[in-house]
Each structure stands twice: as structure tokens, then as C-alpha cells.
Amino acid sequence: MAGAMAGAIETVRRVGDLRARVRGWKAEGLRVGLTPTMGALHEGHLSLVARALEATDRVVATIFVNPTQFGAGEDFSTYPRDEARDGALLARAGASLLFAPPVEEMYPPGFATEVRVSGLTDCLCGAARPGHFDGVAQVVTKLLNQAEADAAVFGEKDWQQLAVIRRLARDLDIPTEILGAPILREADGLAMSSRNRYLTAEERAVAPALARALTAAAAEIAGGRAPAEACADAAAALQAAGFRAVDYVDCREADSLAPVQSAPPARPARIFGAAHLGRARLIDNLPVPGAGR
Ligand code: AMP
């Protein structure tokens, strides 16, 4: 293979080309996996490819920075984009195809259909970023219909997003199995994220306080402390550590995302946090140990 092309991955930009490749594999009796991303890939994204390869024979990764899930004043225009680097990483991780459509392929003139998952999107990031999950539901519904994959993998880093996607796939009878993959973290506990690259060195040193604060609150709630108090303390700890603003620290049931008031929780529960540090908005979540098990 020519040096300049080493590590390149076959890339398609049209839905018709994606479908032709996937249908070809299926005709050979192969199972196909899908890993949707917005690019600027890190090890967390590549772990989704590895998870998909456990469940399927060929993996299609997608890179699409979806304009409809960004609010006014958010980072759509500055979101990091480096398709050549991402393609090489995906090839090395074992993906077979990259689907990287232009915006007009996804939203041609006259596009008019919305997808809204109610209830699950009222809290947490849904409350902090109005309209965000409508954009996510819209684009993921499209990607699932476009790819016709047997399984699609999404990260638990975006736990609420995973819950929304499971629900829409069930409600809309989309026959793709939705799989979750665990959160990959840096050595100091910071959840890997494309947005971590927005952090200055000083902010990067502060960032692990988010996982630490959530871990401490989860342990307190497991030990019987009222969730509201533990979450309020965690939010205060984030402000004290140098976070600019805290969108939420909240304890919710893992599946329904209903608020948890009692401690220790009766059913599986997680603690969720979102906070702004410099230019970055960081999110994280983790289980309340022992809850409901
Ligand atoms: P994004 O490119 O941020 O839209 O993320 C694409 C997919 O990667 C989503 O399913 C995320 O939940 C998942 N993801 C992002 N960061 C991580 C991480 N640190 N560990 C596991 N999955 C992740």
C-alpha cells in the first residue's frame, strides 16, 4: 500500500453507498455493527468499535457533527474535525467502513421531520440543553435507518443519550440491537471526551474533580446520606475546585432516570454531573455502589 494511504479507511458519503456496502456484507451472511460518533476520536470511541467487533463481523463507524443537536452559542462551528486522523485510528481499531456524510446528505432542502422522546429528556442534559436530545434522536434515528446494522454501540459516558436511544429504537420498531459500552477514563479518572482538548493545562489539572466529586457523593448515598445533600455538596466542591458553573449534580434511577430521594436507593441508581470548566462543558456519571442489587 502506498505510504500516504497507509491506515486509510474506505470512506463513503452517500446513504446509497453505505447501504450497498452493508447489504453486500449481509448477503454474505455477515453481521454488521455501527458506531456513531462526531469524530475527534479518542480511546473511548475506539472501545465502541472493539465492542461492536465482539458482537458483529464488520463495523461501520460514522462521523457526523450534527448541527441539530447543538444549541445557539454552543461549539458546533469550533468542534474539532480531523477526518484523516480519525480514519487511520478507525482502520487500526478494526472498522471496515467510515460513513462521513456532508450536512446536505443528512438534511436535504425541505427536510421537515422531528423525533422527540418525551419524559426521559426532561431532566439532566435535556433540561440544561433545550432541544439537544431532539437533535440526537433525529440524527440517530436516521443513522440507524440508513445503516440497517444488526447492532449499534453507544457509550455509557452519555448515559441519558443511551437511554433515549434505547427508547426510540424500541418505540419506533428499529430492528438494530442497541448496546452500551463502559466509560473509558484517563489515568486520573477524567472521562475521555473530545471536548477535553479545549482545556488549558491548568484546567486539565482541575478536571478530575468532577469524577472525584461524583464518586464521593455516590459513596455517601450508598452509605445512607440523603441524595439531595450529597449532590449539593458535590456541586459546591466543583465550584471550589474551579469549575465555572455547575449545570447539575443529580442522583437518578439508572433505567427510568426518575429522581432518587431515599438512601440507600431501592433500585439501581447513578449519579450524574455536568459542569463548565473554561471553554469545555464536561459530563460524567457513575453507579451508586450496591444500589438495588
Ligand atoms: P461523541 O463523538 O462525543 O458524540 O461520542 C460518540 C460516542 O462515543 C457516544 O456513544 C459516546 O457515548 C461515546 N463515548 C464518548 N466518550 C466516551 C468514553 N470516554 N468512554 C466510552 N464511550 C465514549
Image (spheres, rainbow, N blue to C red):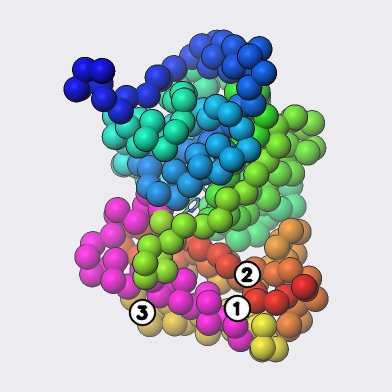
Query: Label 2 amino acid?
Result: Pro
Residue located beneath label 1 in the image: 218
Whether residue 273 is situated above or below residue 31 in the rendered picture: below
Relative side of 202 to 221, left or right: left
> Residue 51 occupies which quadrant of the picture?
top right
Q: Which residues are magenta?
A: 193-220
- Image position, residue 8 (x, y; %): 32, 25
As helix, strand or loop, the secondary structure at mark 3 comes to helix
Q: Of the numbered discs in the image, which one, if any, rests on residue 287?
A: 2
Q: Local crowd at mark 1 within 10 Å, few (<14), some, or many (≥20)?
A: many
Whether residue 126 is situated above or below residue 219 in the rendered picture: above
Residue located beneath label 3 in the image: 241
Query: Label 1 amino acid?
Result: Ala
Inspect this view and state whether residue 62 appears.
no
As helix, strand or loop, the secondary structure at mark 2 comes to strand
Q: Nearer the viewer, mark 3 or mark 1?
A: 1
> Residue 221 occupies which quadrant of the picture?
bottom right
Whole-number angstrom distance, CA of label 1 to CA of label 2: 7 Å
Q: Nearer the viewer, residue 78 or 191?
A: 191
Q: Nearer the viewer, residue 201 or 55?
A: 55
Relative side of 123 to 239, left or right: right
Q: Earlier in the sequence, mark 1 or mark 2?
A: 1
